[in-house]
Image (cartoon, rainbow, N blue to C red):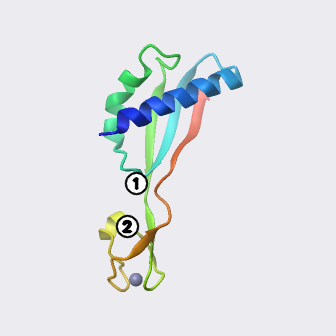
Amino acid sequence: MHELGYATELVATLEELMVKEKLTEITEVTLTCGEATGIIPKYMYDCWPAAIEGTKLEKCLLKVETVPAWGRCRDCEERYVVSLTHGRCPKCGSEDYDMETGYEFEVTEIRGR
Ligand SMILES: [Zn+2]
């Protein structure tokens, strides 16, 4: 479980942003994670209270959205969602692919003032 590391990193990023944007508080943040990061939203929610404790984000709500990881088959160029087919190309059956997306770790929405 590496979610606490990600949560701590997110808090640090948001604290920097608060200084830069002169915000007094952030009430809600939406994080978009790619499936390939291995981040599990439930674990992220579980460790969020520990990550924000004693920081400027103590009252901040977290929302985590995951986006599917897309792969491209090295044999036939088919693009597909890796988790739906367990890494097997639906067109030719090859298990040889390049991961195209899924490594996102981005703040997509912030509510603050
Ligand atoms: Zn293929």
* Percent of width and height locating residue 15: 57, 23
Neighbour tally class for label 1: few under 14, some 14-19, many 20 plus, Cα within 10 Å: many
Relative image position of residue 3 (x, y in whole percent)? 36, 37
Q: If the image is split into quadrants, where does the N terminus sit?
A: top left
Q: Residue 106: horizontal and vertical position, in percent?
A: 54, 44
* Above or below: residue 50 compared with residue 85: above
Horizontal side of 103 relative to 23 (left or right) equals left
Q: How many marks?
A: 2
For image coordinates 63% across by 28% down, the residue present is 17
Contact (Cβ within 8 Å) of mark 2 with mark 1: yes
For the residue marked with disc 1, what is the amino acid? Glu
> Which residue matches tag 1?
35
Left or right of residue 107: residue 48: left
Frontmost residue, 69 versus 98: 98
2 and 27: which one is in front?
A: 2
- Could one spot residue 112 in this view of the protein? no
Q: Which residue occupies 41% across, 24% down?
A: 51
Q: Which mark is residue 19?
A: none
Where 89 sits versus 40, above or below?
below
Residue tagged by mark 2? Answer: 82
Q: Earlier in the sequence, mark 2 or mark 1?
A: 1
Amino acid type of the residue tagged 2 in the rendering: Val
